[in-house]
Image (spheres, helix red, strand yellow):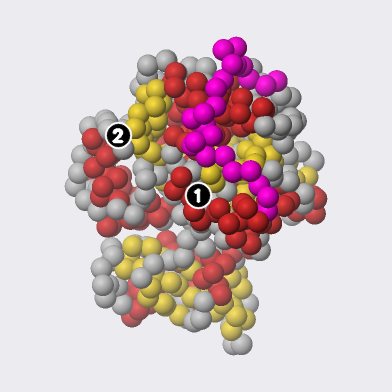
Amino acid sequence: MSNFAQHLLARGRDADPALLQGEQVMAYAELRRQSAAAAALLLASGCRPGERVGLFAENSPFFVVAYLGVLRAGLCAVPFQTEIDEAAFRRIAASTGLRRLWVSPRQSARVKPWVESLGLEPLGEDALSAARAPTDAGFAAVDESRDLAALMYTSGSTGEPKGVKVTHRNLATNTADIVDYLGLTPADRAMAVLPFYYCYGASVLHTHLAVGASLVLARTFMFPEKVLDELEARGCSGLAGVPSTYQILLRKTRFKERRFPALRWLQQAGGRLPEAFIRELRAAHPELRFYTMYGQTEATARMSYLPPERLDDKLGSIGKGLRSTRLEVLREDGRPVTPGSDEVGEIVASGDNVTAGYWQDEEETRRYFRGGRLYTGDLARVDADGFIFVVERARDFIKSAGNRVSPKEIEEVIAELPSVLEVAVVGVPDELWGEAIRAVVVGSAPGRPTADEVLAHCRKRLPNHKVPQYVVLADGLPKTSTGKVDKLRLRGAQA
């Protein structure tokens, strides 16, 4: 079974719900029918094997149908971040040679001028509803190890989007591994708040369809208490989020006081959730299995996870590599760090989930993909039991007054204050220090905490050279479209 779409649509029973959004419920039989029609439409329009087809849509049944249609037809999906600006859209459309773009009704007015000026063919709900699939509609044959299923765009150290080349095998391998450690079954139902154009959000979609489970598609996370209402009303068994998801739920909603009888697991990836929040979550909901995970788009989605039963004694660890992923932590000389020591090395991954590199960027591909392995740029140590602890991304270290300072360590300390909702620490140019330490703090209530309270706490818990020179109180942190803190923008802000 080489075509990944066939893998995703093989298990769900015809009458079982696959997707739920508002009043709309799409059963597996309908999902199969509509995705076959979408594939037939693309092939009838003249798409060539391996051709890139764009998707510009929010999380919706339309997105899922269009995405599966692209894969079914043996084409390559290019999902766009819906917040993208026109210049970035044009660059990606040109570099991928797009001729056709699926566009949802909600996004159509915004992108119509872009599409027209580039001469692209837009495909919307009207085209989909008019399409008909042959009675013998199948799945295009692909070489699963070579043919691309998707180009997933991610921002690198410069902030310039890079297209990661994801094959059908990459997706099948990573999906099977995630299903395995989560123990997903057809009875599962996930609340999907992460966008499907993001590899983490896509993995939630993939894993649930693969086992014949269902997904509730949240329209927005702007009103988190309403998301919790739907989580309870729909009987969701799981929720996947990035650190800010749980920080908001813990300190801006009644999540700690509420109970969710059907909920059994939570997933967290997309950055490190401070330990203070993990302890808070564990205390409020000890009945839930909380999975902390580690991954990168360059490795499809996930590379490791920490089993929930080890959360207390290995707090702060990303766990160990997945079943099909080998993780090594290598020193600069290429040798593994010594387990149980203070040695720090770079996390290097290998396995069938490691992707084929970057689209039309040989230089960056050579930099991060070497000898069949992915060099992640994340620095870590390994404890005596083989559990990996990320210290910092190499590019995020602050060099202040001759000292190498990890922002994560300072963020962990500041997050201990109950009045802190979010915090991010960056280095900013400074004539005296080289780089000064700036902490940008978002309080859980107006006027709390004060800058003096933050500094006093840091002085109690940190050596002098790690105490921030600047504490900036903010209403919110700049985020990427996937919910991660945008430290590039923070570094550019005025102290």
Give me the residue at 49% from left, 36% from top: 126
Residue nearer the viewer, 473 or 22: 22
Callout 2 amino acid: Glu
Q: Is residue 64 visible?
A: yes
Callout 1 amino acid: Ser
Q: Residue 120: image x %, image y %? A: 66, 47
Which structural element holds mark 1?
helix
The span shown in magenta is 118-141
Mark 1 and mark 2: span between their CA atoms? 22 Å
The residue tagged 1 is 108
Give me the residue at 26% from left, 72% from top: 446
Q: Is residue 304 visible?
A: no
Q: Answer yes or no: do the residues labelled 1 and 2 have beta carbons within 8 Å?
A: no
Q: Split into 4 quadrants, where in the image is the N terminus?
A: top right
Q: Is residue 161 above or below residue 190?
A: below
Give me the residue at 70% from left, 20% from top: 141
Instruction: Give the mark nearest the N terminus, 1 or 2.
Output: 2
Give me the residue at 33% from left, 62% from top: 421
